[in-house]
Amino acid sequence: MNMKQVSLLLLSTMILSACVTTDPFAQNNTPKKTSPIEPKKERTLPNRTEEPTYNITLKGQPEAANTCLRQAILSTFRIPEEFLQSESFPRGDYNISLINPATGSTGVSIDLHKKDGSTDAKMYANGTTVSKAWSKILHQCE
């Protein structure tokens, strides 16, 4: 081996060893113990601080209410489906939201919460103006 090859070998060894050793200047070089995998938190409807604009109890399960409300919103306002987002949650709850696909901002939202064979529907304006048509849509699905 010539001197150039020895230098390259030493340099590559130093680089590799730097990748696997701990920082000598760090406060605590002991490896952190990894905790067992924490169970995933169950997704639920968002916790809201504001009062709903409309609050109504619908007959039937949230899944049926979700389908009815989606159809009513799309046909009443004649908006494309990409402006309406529907999300289901493990406990059988749903959320329907108007979404601006260009900005991702959320407009009117309806939370559908399962309750003893019926569905609590709570509509939130999220800073938008809500017309009476929204109340009529909720009542279409009673």
Image (cartoon, helix red, strand yellow):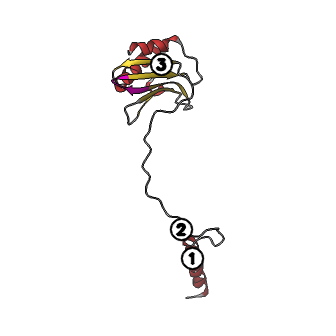
Q: Quadrant of residue 94?
A: top left
Main SS class of the magenta portion in the image: strand
Estimate how packed mark 2 is, as few (under 14), some (14 to 19) or many (20 or more) residues with alpha carbons within 10 Å. Answer: few
Q: Where residue 40 sits in the image (x, y, percent)?
A: 43, 47
Q: Is residue 59 magenta?
A: no
Q: Residue at x 33, y 23 (%)?
A: 117
Q: Is residue 117 highlighted in magenta?
A: yes
Q: Secondary structure at mark 1?
A: helix
Amino acid marked by disc 3: Asn
Visible residue check, residue 29: yes
Residue at 55%, 74% (x, y): give it: 16
Disc 3 secondary structure class: strand
In the image, residue 132 sits, relative to residue 21, either above or below, namely above
> Residue 71 at what x, y percent from top left?
39, 19
Looking at the image, is 74 positioned above or below residue 99?
A: above
Disc 3 target residue: 55
Res. 84 visible in picture? no
Q: Earlier in the sequence, mark 2 or mark 1?
A: 1
Identify which amino acid the numbered label 2 is placed on. Pro
Find the magenta span and give its range: 112-118
Q: Quadrant of the C terminus?
A: top left
